Amino acid sequence: MTRKKIIYTALFWFALVAIVVLGFTAYTYFQIKDYLNSSTSFVVVFVGIIVTLALGIAIAGITAFVVVMNKDKEEVKEEKKMATVIYGSEVAKELKNEMTMEIAKRMDEGKKIPTLCVILVGNNPASVSYVTGKEKACKEVGLGSKMIHLDENTTQAELLKVIDDCNKDNEIDGILVQLPLPSHLNEKEVVWAINPEKDVDGLHPINVGKLHLGEDGFVPCTPQGIIELLKRMNVELKGKRAVVIGRSNLVGNPVARLLMNENATVTICHSKTENIQAVCKEADILVVAIGKAKFVTKDFVKEGAYVIDVGVNRNEEGKLVGDVDFDDVVEHVTAITPVPKGVGPMTITMLLKNTIEACKRREG
Ligand code: GUN
């Protein structure tokens, strides 16, 4: 409600009270005027005017006060409504539709169907679920997919041989080795064995180097998905303060670099960061990839920030929750990604995009 409306409301109540009290005074005056002399008449009129003014001002004041209090409540309600929930699942759907059309066109033109090979060692339930999701997504858009599921006890040499075969296989455009690997395997050696031109995960040192040099390589899928989401939301990154919690090779480090490439001023926080809440509170864009359920509360968040939650944790009831305490934070931010249906669907979608890109680059 505007200031003008508040004044009009107060005036309305003042006028109403004035009419009622003055009317009552006039009525009383005419009823008793024969018994009054000039000085008592003056007292009656004077008292009537004073009562009118006092009551009118009091009621108008109370009205204005009530209106202002309600106005504050309305504004709080509006602020609560304001936060946008960024559904990566919706953006992923759009991107997948675009890719489906692209693959269909390639088929019509008799071109190669881009094919992704996913290698899974062991039966880590989360990894099995992620790999199944990747296979399903390939099918949805019409990409070729090959799943190689190796025994938990696969040796380093056996795994390297499988990767070498995939590197040489012309049918395969993209290779992803699902991480983490069982502890007896050397993850670094495995990732480094993948042909960088098929490294659709963007984890090979050649691709990591290219990202840091601003060259065209493959960028890890989750960070790429995050930037895509922010761009689709038209979030201005140039000159903004971005804080990333987490410094992993899969998310924290590459997303920080991508944000810097977009001219944001970037800080990375990690387990040794002092006064982490104060650092995060400066962020216009806060990316959280720390792997701790509901770690980020409203005390970490600047009013009006954009919050990207990369965490996927299970709470005591087995429900998926992010690294951000969504309910605590949502009223204080401009936009926030939920868990699930936030960043997760974008990761798989970027993997499909990278596989198509790998195929095109290999075609020359
Ligand atoms: N495990 C969890 N996320 C990922 C990912 O993006 N790539 C690979 N290779 N393993 C993962």
Image (cartoon, helix red, strand yellow):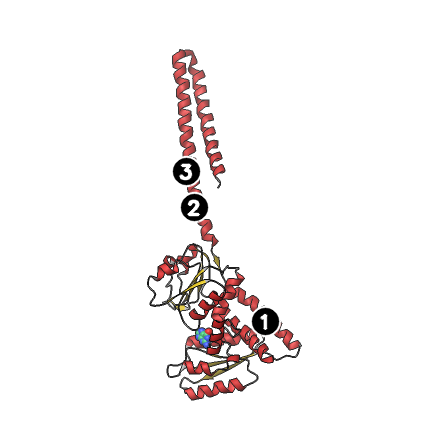
Amino acid of disc 1: Met
Q: Which mark is residue 99?
A: 1
Question: Residue 321, located in which quarter of the rendered image?
Answer: bottom left
Across and down, in percent, residue 272 comes to 33, 67
Describe the element under mark 1 as helix, strand or loop: helix
Say if residue 11 shows up in the picture: yes
Across and down, in percent, residue 319 comes to 41, 67
Q: Residue at x 33, y 63 (%)?
A: 274
Q: Which one is nearer the viewer's eye here, 286 or 116?
A: 286
Amino acid of disc 3: Phe
Question: Residue 94, located in which quarter of the rendered image?
Answer: bottom right
Q: Which one is nearer the viewer's eye here, 275 or 183?
A: 275
Q: How far, Cα to Cα, is label 1 from label 3?
A: 58 Å
In the image, taking residue 117 as reference, residue 37 lies left or right, namely: left
Say how many tags the image has: 3
- Give the residue pinned by disc 3: 65
Q: How far, Cα to Cα, is label 2 from label 3?
A: 13 Å
Upstream in sequence: badge 2 or badge 3: 3
| Mark 1 or mark 2, whichever is nearer to me | 1
Upstream in sequence: badge 1 or badge 2: 2
Upstream in sequence: badge 1 or badge 3: 3
Q: How far, Cα to Cα, is label 1 from label 2?
A: 46 Å
Within 10 Å of disc 2 (Cα), the crowding (few <14, some 14-19, many 20+) is few
Amino acid of disc 2: Lys
Describe the element under mark 2 as helix, strand or loop: helix
Q: Which mark is residue 357?
A: none
For the C terminus, the image quarter is: bottom right
- Give the residue pinned by disc 2: 73
